[in-house]
Image (cartoon, rainbow, N blue to C red):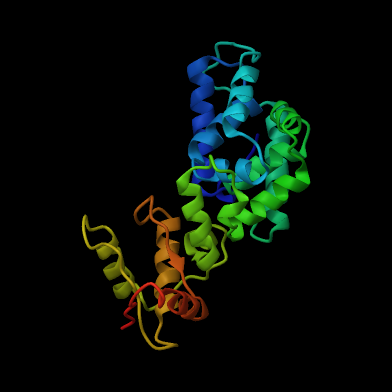
């Protein structure tokens, strides 16, 4: 499959690499959809439980069925395994779905969504659990734009709940940078380097940019997000932008619990 890796987010690229490695390790004849799903589940430890919880599917039962399906895969000694035609179809659909969302960059959730859209063994498992393309689309939209914790089942991982709350009140700037929605920032190199120094500390590593409107706070955040998306910063760092209106709502909600200082 001639897949342009520049079309993928870092996590999607890592999932593909993991699928290739798993195929070699287990001596599968080709990289099949089931193997790719295992790689997506490993790389998307917060995303997969959220999506399955949103559509009302027990993740343990789903994972078990994927594992059982892998037992039917054909084995062969192959030092350079290729992507099966079925997986190529899934990835082509993932690119199509990402393009429809204007970004054009394939994130893990687009790949997971694509399994439900086209005919493939993982899609059959999804349909057996009652997952339809429409349900999966709604789950992906909730994940990308911030869903409510009540949408998930009680067994959903706490990390997915926390991510849902964060996305409700903030925008993932690194994701926007990976999707190509942030223009290069000019003239803020010193400030961006300073913030990078702070977030790479072992302690006291949570910078907050405060200032009057128009002083360049967003430009610094965008520049930092672009650097991290390019691999020039911490690999597991999320940059989130909280709008002024959201801060005002959070401040009002917090007053009944205690004091909240805003410098």
x 45%, y 70%: residue: 222
x 53%, y 61%: residue: 167
Is residue 16 visible to us here? no
Instruction: Please determine whether, in this image, residue 91 is positioned above or below residue 225.
Output: above
Image quadrant where one finds the C terminus: bottom left
Give x and y (percent) for residue 194: 27, 70
x 70%, y 45%: residue: 136
**Which residue is more in the foreground, 60 or 77?**
60
Give x and y (percent) for residue 133: 76, 43
Q: Is residue 161 left or right of residue 204?
A: right
Q: In the orientation shown, which residue stands out farthest toward the front?
A: 256
**Which residue is more in the foreground, 158 or 116?**
158
Give x and y (percent) for residue 252: 46, 79
Is residue 248 visible to us here? yes
Q: Is residue 23 left or right of residue 142?
A: left
Give x and y (percent) for residue 1: 65, 34
Instruction: Please determine whether, in this image, residue 38 is positioned above or below residue 186.
Output: above
x 59%, y 57%: residue: 148
**Which residue is more in the foreground, 223 or 184?**
223
């Amino acid at each position: 499959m001639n897949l342009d890796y520049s079309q993928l987010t870092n996590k999607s690229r890592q999932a593909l690499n993991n699928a290739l490695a798993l195929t070699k390790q287990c001596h599968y004849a080709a990289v099949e959809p089931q193997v790719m799903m295992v790689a997506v589940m490993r790389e998307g430890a917060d995303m997969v439980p959220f999506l399955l919880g949103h559509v009302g599917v027990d993740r343990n039962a789903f994972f078990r069925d994927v594992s059982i399906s892998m037992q039917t895969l054909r084995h062969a000694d192959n030092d350079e395994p290729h992507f099966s035609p079925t997986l190529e179809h899934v990835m082509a659909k993932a690119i199509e779905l990402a393009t429809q969302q204007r970004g054009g960059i394939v994130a893990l959730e687009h790949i997971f969504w694509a399994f439900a859209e086209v005919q493939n063994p993982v899609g059959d498992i999804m349909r057996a659990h009652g997952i339809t393309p429409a349900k999966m689309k709604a789950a992906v939209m909730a994940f990308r734009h911030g869903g409510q914790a009540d949408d998930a089942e009680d067994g959903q991982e706490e990390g997915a709940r926390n991510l849902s709350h964060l996305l409700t009140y903030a925008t993932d700037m690194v994701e926007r940078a990976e999707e190509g929605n942030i223009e290069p920032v000019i003239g803020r190199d010193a400030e961006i380097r300073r913030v990078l120094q702070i977030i790479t500390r072992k302690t006291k590593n949570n910078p907050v940019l405060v200032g009057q409107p128009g002083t360049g706070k967003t430009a610094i955040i965008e520049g930092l997000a672009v650097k991290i998306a390019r691999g020039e910063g911490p690999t597991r760092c999320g940059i989130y932008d909280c709008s002024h209106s959201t801060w005002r709502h959070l401040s009002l909600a917090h007053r009944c619990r205690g004091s909240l200082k805003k410098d």
